[in-house]
Amino acid sequence: MSLLDLIFPPRCGGCGAYGAPWCVACAGTLRPPSATTLAGIPLVAASRFDGPLQQAIHTYKYRPRPQLASVLAPPLGRAVVTAGLLMPALTFVPLHPRRQRERGFNQAQRLAAELASALGIPLVSGLTRVRATPAQVGLSQAERRANLAGAFRWSGPQPPGDHLGLVDDVCTTGATLTSAAEAVAEAGGSIGAFLVLAVAQTLPAVAVT
């Protein structure tokens, strides 16, 4: 334990208890969803988007506490290993530059960096958000799809590879992930798996095959 931890003890991102950034009790509440696919692509999540994990993700993004990436990424890493997925590299869903300046960091990028390190594979930057979009909260699946049409583009120095893992924090309707995957495909690459901390119970059945 560092001197800083003694002066300012860490608090759990899920329940707020002092002692650890992600406590044992909250870790025990994770409920990994059944294996599924989104638009024909495997979708892997550490848990459902509820309970302490939902609170921890909100704390991570909006307080903000970017250091929580180091404790939230391992459950996703274990889910990836359990799924038996082999990916040559990871990439991540970008924020619009204005949103990233406001927040101070990209939560998906931080998660992807932690996950790539744990899995021993490269992290590739290249997706950019070329159009600022209104908040997705409260929008239907169709509205989310329309909101994100043309929002992403691959602008990396090299073309994207095939079968990349695409990382984001939450999958609600799948609109963000599928739109980003389309941008990768348009640049000549492909997404081999969607990797998220949590999947919402509202994920529509029509999006899951």
Image (cartoon, rainbow, N blue to C red):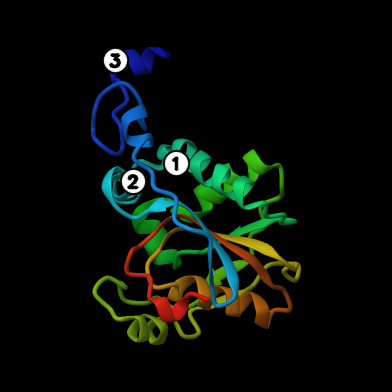
| Image location of residue 140, percent across then percent down | 30, 81
Element carrying mark 3: helix
Q: Which mark is residue 53?
A: 2
Which residue occupies the foreground of this view, 109 or 167? 167
Secondary structure of residue under mark 1: helix
Q: Position of residue 38 (x, y in %)?
A: 52, 72
Residue 127 circle label: none
Residue 159 shows up from this direction: yes
The answer to whether residue 181 is above or below residue 14 is below
Residue nearest the observer in this picture, 188 or 158: 188
Q: Amino acid at mark 2?
A: Leu
Q: Give the CA separation, mark 2 to mark 3.
A: 26 Å
Among the 4 quarters of the image, the one containing residue 162: bottom right
* Residue type, numbered disc 1: Leu
User: Looking at the image, do the residues carrying marks 1 and 2 touch, with CB atoms under 8 Å apart?
Assistant: yes
Q: Residues within 10 Å of mark 3 (few under 14, many from 20)?
A: few
Name the residue that disc number 3 marks: 7
In the visual, does 170 lie left or right of 82?
A: left
Q: Point out the tag, 2 or 3, that comes first from the N-terminus.
A: 3
Judging by the rendered image, the residue that carries numbered circle 1 is 72
Q: Amino acid at mark 3?
A: Ile
Label pair 3/1, CB-CB below 8 angstroms: no
Q: SS at mark 2?
A: helix
Question: At which x and y percent is residue 12?
Answer: 30, 32
Q: Nearer the viewer, residue 41 or 9?
A: 41
**Label 3, label 1: how many angstroms apart (C-alpha)?**
23 Å
**Residue 137: quarter of image:** bottom left
- 6 relative to 122 in the view: left or right: left
> Up-down: is 16 above or below 18?
below
Q: Residue at x 38, y 70 (%)?
A: 203
- Seen at 58% across and 74% down, the residue is 181
In primary-sequence order, the first of circles 1 and 2 is 2
